[in-house]
Image: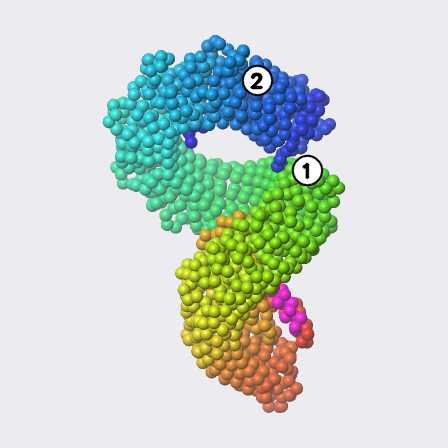
Amino acid sequence: MFCSHPLRRHCLLIITVIVATSSRGSCLCHKEQSNALLRLKASFNFDYSFSLSSWNVDTNCCTWEGVTCDGTSGYVTALDLSGLYISGNLSSSSDIFKLTSLRFLSLADNYFDASPWPSPGLEQLTDLEYLDLSYSGLSGDLHIENGQLSKLATLNLSGLHLRYLSLEALIDNLGSLQELQLDEANISVTPADLAHASSTNTPSGLKELSMRSRITNNSTLDTVFTNLLFRSKLANLVSLDLYNLDLRNMSLHTLIDSLENLQELYLGNVNISVNPTDKPHASSTNTASGLKVLFIRNCDQFGTALTNIQFRSMLANLVTLGLSDFDLRNLSLHALIGSFGNLENLYLEDVVISASPTHISHASSTNTTSGLKVLSMVFCIITGGHFDTALVTDIRFRSMLANLVTLGLSYFDLRNLSLHALIGSFGNLENLYLEEVAISASPTHISHASSTNTASGLKELRMQWCTITTGHFDAVLSKLPFLSKLILDGTTFSGHVPVPERFAELSSLAVLSLQRCGLKGTFPSRIFHLKNLMYLDVSGNDNLRGVLPEFILASALQVLILSGTKFSGKIPESIGNLRNLTELDLSNCQFHGSIPPFTQWPMISSIDLSGNNLTGSLPSDGYLALHNLTTVHLSNNSMSGVIPASLFSLPSLESLDLSRNNFTGNFLLHLNISSNLGKIDLSNNKLQGPIPKLLSDLVGIYWLDLSFNNFTGIVDLSFIKNYMELDYLSLSYNKLSVILEDGNHSYAGYPTIGELSLASCNLSYVPKLLMHQVEMGGLDLSNNNITGHIPDWIWRTASGLNLSHNLFTSIATNLSNSSLLYLDIHSNKIDGALPLPPLGTSQLDYSDNHFNSSVTLEFWSHISSVISLSLANNSINGEVSHSICNATKIEILDLSFNNFSGLIPACLLIRNKHLEILNLKDNNFHGSLPQDIHVECALQVIDLNSNRLEGKLPTSIINCHRLQVLDVGNNLIVGTFPEWLGFLRFLKVLILHSNRFHGPIDDSYGMKKLQVLDLSSNSFNGSIPTRFLTQFKAMKVVSSGSVATYVEIIAPASASSSASASSPYYRPYFKESVTLTLKGKETTLVQILSVFMNLDLSNNKFEGIIPNEIGDLKFLKGLNLSKNSFTGGIPPRIANMRQLESLDLSCNKLSGEIPPAMAQMSFLEVLNLSYNNLSGMIPQSSQFLTFPDTSFVGNNGLCGKPLPRMCDANHAPSAAGTPGSSKGLNWEILSVEAGVISGLVMVFATTLLWDNGRRWVYWQVDKFLLYTMEPWLHGRRN
């Protein structure tokens, strides 16, 4: 909107004079005034982080925040308390009125009680020149009409309710008043019948008046303005700002004509006529007014009024014109500019206007050059021709704009125009601003286009969120030798977009910003050496590569931002040569090596190196010289060593984030800790020792995260009582014991906490402090030892509550009146009926408790807004109501390990488009699965294991395009092998164990990502086709250098917008588990590692030979082919499976010798070759000697240890295979890490020599999987 407020020239002048004649501490203030200020502070209530902490006894008040004293006398002359969120009363005895030397007073933007204004009050401050009470909350009868404030020059009463204050009396009684702001103020505008009201027509000295969105009383404002007496009071007005007013009985002509000294007029949404009125005071001449600046919004008559000669002549001296929200389609842009000979600046917003000149008589008929220097057009619609071609083809239009210095165009389609031609059409153009404009880069063939050999004088080119449709942008750059500022943020280029080398040739370039431009390739290092470059930002180009060059001493660079790119390598030591550097942001790149010693940059204000792989330690000293440093963010690196206490003493430091590193040692603070510190994040390090008591002195702290360290000792939570604002506090997952020992037990002075995390803090009770907290964003008390009943008052404390992993035994049965968005009470000892959940909750976890009732219909009706729901691991019975179909946004549903019965509601598979995880494992559901699964199915996990489901597996499951886990084991499902599952390209786990599947396995294809396949305990028959094995690409190859990560749920196309998903306390509770036969026993894996592979075809009717190609599945951890009818020998290539930990070929008809090369399978923990027809000597390697004799029994031809049957002379001891053997073993060196399971095997290898030890290791491995596979779920939506 163009009706912006004018520059407050008089205000600035007053402030300048006061400051020039005052002091901030060169002399001592007077004791009585210091005491008055301290009493004033004591009477205030503060919110947030503002507390006037510098106002202390026995200190010079002239140095206090917001206080300015006279340089000679020491009296307080200025008091600025604006924006401190102060609440309370201002009584007539308030000490603020005892500061009679005040010349400047601001109480703006506070929350004072709307009580009657004190009397006597402000009239006691007779020296006052500047008074700002705007939006302070004050109201009532303001006594400033009695003439005492005769020196007051500036008054701001915006936003106040002062209906008994007469506007005329206000102006009449404040004889020195020059600036008056009454925006959104409620006062009277009818002259009051007051004894002191002036009866003369003497003009006031008022020069600036602003009344925006004003509420009127008793009379309309236009009547006042048309009143001759009132108009004479405003005769000296220079600037008038009116917004949202009804002036229907007044004309714009009359308003301007009546105010002879008016130079600036701002009208917005004002109901006013444009044509002159017939009232006697209207001017009858065509004399030009002195108006130089006119901004007007939403006045449709203005375009028509331009045809009126009298009106145009009145505006003949206009220098600046701004029009917003107009329909001027009957007027051309050419005619508009030609109507005002002195016009230099034209701003159009939301205007409909013609491009071509009209035939209106006043339109200029010549090609005269106008004086227009600035043209800005935003959200405009051009009619009657193509604006893009008119800009450069219409000779009259171009000649009129020949003096144009600045051109701004936003939201235009200029694809028929080239940037080259646009710049070349205006020889004096210095600044070009384009926003969301589509335009070509290359020169066009239009005859008017400027010569390609002509250099432009353009100095600033700003193109934000534009689209370069065609052409080469570097060709444009070659003609801009004087360009000093180039900003292309969000602009996209056609085709492949490397960074143009021409940037490095722009010798005058001082500012280069290329944020989020989709740039690719390598960033030219020469650009860093541009001698005038002060600002460089290429952030958000995630495919842009580059390295930092060696920097020279003479560099002018002040701001360097490369965040979110693929810049890599080491940060050179020469970066210390950037002595002018004020901001350095290299976050989320790929830098490694030592962190640069940032103490070498004397001007630095902000450093962000987070999200790299930087090492080394922090400098131990040198911080006190960094007076401007406010932000230090070094999180997500590999830094180590101690954190120097002097770092916290940086004088201006506001935000310090060292989280997710390897810092060790104690957390130490000095007495001179920075008073500006607002954020400290030291989470996820290896810090130890006690938490420093000096933290209680940081009254301005709003974010404190010390979680996931090794801090020890007792922490009294009362250390936060001095804090004014606390958005986030986390002490979770240390070795702390948190207590609360505040003797008064009132907790009234404690701050309002935004989010509080005290997980794993050895709490045995819920801190009573929380009784006084309301509407916290999140409260986490999980993993403590809190017992008994969950306090009923806790439900009103926060919108997110995590009480999981405690010892609670009971809970209120009805939580529907709380406003919880997410509630997690899993892993407690709560029994009885399920509590009725809060209405509108989005995440609910009641799992792992002792609930033992059925689910009521009312419960199902309360979860219609739920996104994730878990009732797993209870003893809940009954059927799942079809009311669950109303939960149309549900993404996770886990009812596993209960006693639910009946049919599975078909809507979960047929209608729900958002459900990603469905876990109904281990219940008593029966019936068939629906055959018509929705084509937009979003399911990624389907676990129906251990129910009584029957019928066929629906082929429509292939509509679940992102399905990763399908587990229907232990049911009664029939049919042949579902080879059509090969169409699911993300499928990683397929478990059909223990059903009634039958028939051969055909040559299926497409299961390239499958990691776990369990077809055991069915009636499959025939041989194993070679092609069946070759499709399992994931079992053959693990990406080079990959680490053991977890299978992650694919983010939905449109992420949930629920409040819980964005909260730090959002904890997706779902733990997908699969039960497999591993190492000879059934094992439940809570989740699947990306390097975990398992193939189980046991207990079927397979026959024929085992294909040699099975040895190509090199990364299998477990292979079970037992209890079939396989014949032939053990495939020699099976020895290639070097990652194999469990191999079971028992109960088949295999013959021949054990391949000697199998002795090299060093990770093999469990081997079962029993009950076959094998013969020969068992390999006598150290690995094979760890296996018990039960691994080989039932093979009458086998001999050698561990069997009691020794081999005769005809059986020479079997040696391990060698690289030169003829067994065909692939001896390529495997570089893939063994993963966490293999690591445990190596740690506990000695325990494998006896059965009890083996069982213990298995239990430890499974427990390790249980606890280490869970974190990916916690991070799924964070």
Question: What mark, if any, has residue 749 been given in the picture?
Answer: 1
Residue sitting at x 59%, y 14%: 148
Residue that numbered label 2 is attached to: 144
855, 976: nearer the viewer: 855
**Where the N terminus falls, by quadrant?**
top left
- Horizontal and vertical percent for residue 429? 37, 31
Looking at the image, residue 737 lies above or below residue 312? below
Instruction: Kindly report the secondary structure that dominates the magenta region of the rendered protein.
Output: helix
Which residue is farthest bottom? Answer: 1209
Which residues make up the magenta segment?
Answer: 1254-1265
Residue 80: percent from the left, percent from the top?
60, 26
Residue 778: image tag: none
Residue at image position (50%, 53%) is 864
- For residue 32, say whether it is visible: yes
Q: Residues within 10 Å of mark 2 (few under 14, many from 20)?
A: some
* Residue 511 in the image: above or below residue 225: below
Name the foreground residue: 879 vs 679.
879
Judged from this view, the residue extending furthest toward the top is 200
Secondary structure type for disc 1 = loop
Under mark 2, the amino acid is Ile
